[in-house]
């Protein structure tokens, strides 16, 4: 094994332009993938994990050039292209994003993909055998008997029978179709397979079968794998290393064992706490992430996770309970967005005797945002009360102004740098920057 | 032949394979080429060498002068044979499945039978039954088992009983005023109807599918322009255009077919475009693009076949329109009077409806049944070929 990674992604971006108006002027861009970078060594499995909408699949299709990436570099050293060095103008001869049509077609023999939904990834009007054999045909193998022989052998290898060659996709179950999808991805003998949620559409029992099949094939044919999933338990089973993605960025990357044992980024923590434990009596110590993923058109400033982070940093001089701090920031954001409607809260309170008073509304607001009745820090408590009073007085704008003036977090201002925890384990969180020296700029240029 | 070569996917030497480039023709294409080339040569010979009055096949024997429409018809028949009928034999399992689905619709099976009769009669009938000939003396002969008053008939071929001329097997469906045999007229009309059906369908399908898929895949301004052009085609007054051509150049069957087909593909193109757009979003198209296949290949091998069920249905439902249009024009006296089409036969008998209704009724019923059969067939094909239904029944 050489030191050269089989796939090396640097600063990959995929922005979808948003056009408006009669002249189709570009008014913005959805930054689905915004500068990610990772390496995959030969024979290695890298997991790419994150919740829905964080850009995992876009990253995959940009890497394999199913979609044209906006910027960045994808260096593919498989397929006998290894050992190349950079040209004098800084471009790499193996940069997939710069490949010509002929080179791209050759690249297709070196990197293949498996899709999430086995039901829709086969042409319903073509026998599965010819669907797999078509790959060979496209790349110039004109001898139909030879194509058939190769595909029949391969179908047996992935756990089906040679007679299945002439059957149609609808005659197979989801797990069988995913086996055929594996055969299709394998038939050109690639060095790298990108698996985009290959098992998330399958039953858990079938999942295990497919995962062990992938494992076996990987050892047999020395494949490298980019394995995309939102399921941490699947990642733990199959991946050597894992990269955690949030809103178009990679927030943490490291060896699977290390990341699972000692997650460094709060988002990773939250994802890990979502894995169900087999013990029915254990209370789920789950970290609940409030809200949805922010829109990639207008990602939050600073650290993109700060709007939902349970470990969001308190500024100097502030020292309150962490969950109160999160609640205050949520309250601030909602007030600023004009989403706190005092009147409707007042109407919804049920009081046993007498009319609802302002105090009831105050208490209700605090419960809703998970803020203690009395915050330890008197200054913070005063500001908060002041803001609630202004809100009750109907002056939403003043309340929003006061809140955003007084409650700030460094997370919203500074973009976190990569921190190296151990040789292979990096994360981007501001909390680490004070603890450890920043990475020597190697991995995230 | 494959034994001495490696048969495992990971032992394939791709650098060697990808270097060899040659056309990989399917059996269908080879057959099509083998059959179409002689046809082309004969057509060129007919056009360039033979003078206009010599029947094409005179050197060989039969005095059949092959015309432009005939060449086109034979060509479309070859297309039909090699790209629709032959694949049905190549995929017996799929054919059986379609047949099972199709069989559920009984009227459609009967329709298919009727259309088969029209098809076979139209292709082989003219070789056995000579074209109807004018013979004033034997005009208004009644169909067999029927009779007509002696005074209408100048010479009764059959017996005359009680001053009634009886029909004979010599003219099973009677004759027209000019003494043309109605039965042989109907058989020769089948040829005309099949020619109209096949040639227009081929033209409409070719233009419509090409236009629709190109438009869908080009996108942007090209798509916009092409679809606005389709709007123009759709809103074009075809009948007026045809009348104009008729008065300037005169219009034979060939002109009718070309003009009506040239303005009928708009709906097909629009339909194919929307189908292609939805199919191109499917994941299996993505999976195919990742194989390195060219866009042309993906369209030809995956997009068009998946849209085919709807396209075939739509085309089947277009044919009755052409047949009716031809009959209507003939009835109005605007058709090609030199051809023995059903419409000409109907228009020949319209003034004698009071005493010789068979001249109108016989071809009229045949035309009616054929149009009905095409409509039933179209509906049944939609159900039988629908891929969603296929998935549900699996």
Image: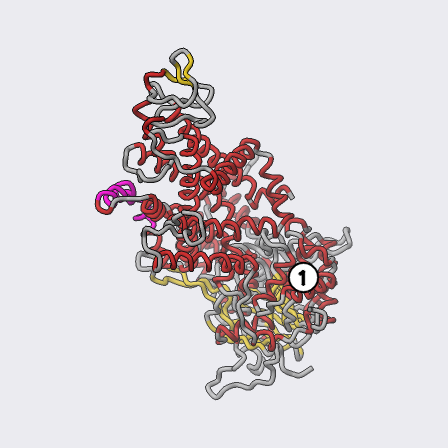
Q: Is residue B322 magenta?
A: no
Chain at numbered mark 1: A
Residue A155 position by quadrant: bottom right
Instruction: Tell me what residue is drawn at x 47 percent, y 35 percent.
Output: B375
* Res A318 seen here: no
Q: Disc 1 designates what residue?
A: A232
Give how far across and how far down residue A345 sits, in percent: 50, 43
Indicate whether B317 appears above or below A302. Answer: above
- Across and down, in percent, residue A308 comes to 55, 60
- The residue sitting at 52% across, 79% down in the picture is A445
Classify B170 as above or below B1. Answer: above
Residue B178 seen in render: yes
Apparent side of residue A316 relative to residue B216 in the rendered image (left or right): right
Q: Is residue B355 above or below residue B293?
A: above
- Segment tinted magenta in the rendering: B230-247
Looking at the rendering, in which quadrant would you find the C terminus of chain B?
A: top right
Does residue B242 show up magenta in the picture? Answer: yes
């Amino acid at each position: 094994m050489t030191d050269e990674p089989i796939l090396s992604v640097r600063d990959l971006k995929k922005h979808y332009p948003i056009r408006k108006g009669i002249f189709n002027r570009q008014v913005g861009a959805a930054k689905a993938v915004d500068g990610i970078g990772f390496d995959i060594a030969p024979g290695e499995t890298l997991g790419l994990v994150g919740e829905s909408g964080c850009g995992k699949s876009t990253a995959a299709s940009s890497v394999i050039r199913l979609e044209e990436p906006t910027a960045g570099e994808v260096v593919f050293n498989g397929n006998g292209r290894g050992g190349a060095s950079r040209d004098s103008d800084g471009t790499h001869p193996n940069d997939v994003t710069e490949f010509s049509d002929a080179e791209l077609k050759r690249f297709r023999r070196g990197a293949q993909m498996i899709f999430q939904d086995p039901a829709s990834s086969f042409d319903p009007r073509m026998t599965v055998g010819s669907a797999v054999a078509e790959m060979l045909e496209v790349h110039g193998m004109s001898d139909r008997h030879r194509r058939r022989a190769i595909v029949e052998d391969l179908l047996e290898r992935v756990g089906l029978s040679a007679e299945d060659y002439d059957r149609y996709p609808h005659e197979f179950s989801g797990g069988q179709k995913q086996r055929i999808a594996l055969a299709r991805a394998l038939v050109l003998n690639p060095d790298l397979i990108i698996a985009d949620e290959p098992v998330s559409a399958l039953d858990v029992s079938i999942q295990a079968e497919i995962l062990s099949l992938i494992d076996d094939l990987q050892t047999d044919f020395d494949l490298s794998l980019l394995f995309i999933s939102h399921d941490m338990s699947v990642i733990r089973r199959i991946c050597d290393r894992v990269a955690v993605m949030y809103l178009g960025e990679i927030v943490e990357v490291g060896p699977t064992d290390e990341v699972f044992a000692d997650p460094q980024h709060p988002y990773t923590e939250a994802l890990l706490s979502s894995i169900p434990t087999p013990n029915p009596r254990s209370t789920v110590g789950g970290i609940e992430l409030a809200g949805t993923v922010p829109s990639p058109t207008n990602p939050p400033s600073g650290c993109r996770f700060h709007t939902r982070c349970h470990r969001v940093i308190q500024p100097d001089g502030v020292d309150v309970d962490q969950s109160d701090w999160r609640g205050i920031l949520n309250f601030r954001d909602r007030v600023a967005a004009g989403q706190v409607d005092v009147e409707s809260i007042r109407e919804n309170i049920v009081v046993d005797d007498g009319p609802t008073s302002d105090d009831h509304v105050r208490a209700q607001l605090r419960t809703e945002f998970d803020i203690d009745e009395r915050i330890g820090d008197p200054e913070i408590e005063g500001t908060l009360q002041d803001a609630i009073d202004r809100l009750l007085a109907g002056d939403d704008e003043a309340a929003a102004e006061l809140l955003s003036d007084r409650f700030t977090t460094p997370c919203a201002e500074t973009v976190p740098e990569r921190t190296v925890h151990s040789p292979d384990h990096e994360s981007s969180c501001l909390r680490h920057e004070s603890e450890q020296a920043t990475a020597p700029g190697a991995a995230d240029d | 032949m494959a034994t001495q070569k490696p048969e495992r996917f990971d032992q394939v030497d791709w650098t060697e394979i990808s270097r060899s480039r040659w056309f990989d023709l399917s059996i269908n294409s080879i057959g099509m080429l083998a059959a179409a080339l002689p046809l082309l040569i004969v057509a060129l010979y007919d056009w360039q060498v033979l003078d206009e009055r010599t029947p094409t096949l005179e050197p060989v024997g039969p005095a059949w002068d092959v015309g432009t429409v005939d060449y086109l018809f034979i060509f479309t028949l070859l297309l039909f044979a090699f790209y629709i009928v032959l694949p049905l034999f190549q995929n017996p399992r799929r054919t059986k499945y379609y047949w099972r689905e199709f069989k559920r619709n009984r009227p459609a099976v009967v329709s298919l039978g009727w259309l088969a009769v029209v098809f076979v009669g139209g292709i082989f009938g003219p070789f056995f039954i000579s074209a109807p000939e004018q013979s004033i003396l034997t005009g208004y002969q009644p169909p067999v088992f029927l009779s007509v008053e002696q005074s209408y008939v100048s010479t009764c071929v059959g017996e005359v009983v009680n001053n009634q001329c009886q029909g004979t097997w010599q003219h099973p469906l009677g004759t027209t005023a000019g003494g043309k045999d109605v039965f042989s007229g109907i058989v020769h009309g089948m040829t005309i109807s099949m020619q109209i059906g096949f040639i227009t369908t081929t033209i409409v399908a070719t233009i419509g599918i090409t236009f629709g898929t190109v438009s869908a895949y080009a996108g942007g301004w090209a798509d916009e322009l092409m679809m606005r052009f389709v709007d123009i085609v759709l809103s074009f007054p075809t009948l007026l255009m045809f009348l104009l051509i008729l008065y300037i150049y005169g219009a034979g069957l060939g002109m009718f077919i070309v003009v009506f087909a040239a303005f009928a593909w708009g709906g097909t193109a629009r339909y194919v475009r929307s189908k292609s757009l939805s199919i191109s979003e499917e994941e299996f198209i993505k999976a195919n693009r990742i194989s390195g296949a060219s866009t042309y290949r993906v369209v030809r091998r995956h997009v068009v076949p998946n849209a085919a069920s709807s396209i075939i249905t739509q085309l089947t439902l277009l044919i009755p329109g052409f047949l009716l249009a031809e009959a209507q024009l003939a009835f109005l006296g605007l058709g090609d009077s030199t051809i023995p089409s059903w419409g000409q036969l109907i228009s020949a008998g319209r003034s004698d409806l009071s005493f010789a209704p068979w001249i109108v009724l016989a071809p009229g019923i045949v035309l009616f049944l054929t149009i009905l059969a095409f409509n039933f067939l179209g509906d049944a094909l939609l159900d039988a070929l629908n891929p969603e239904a296929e998935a549900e029944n699996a």
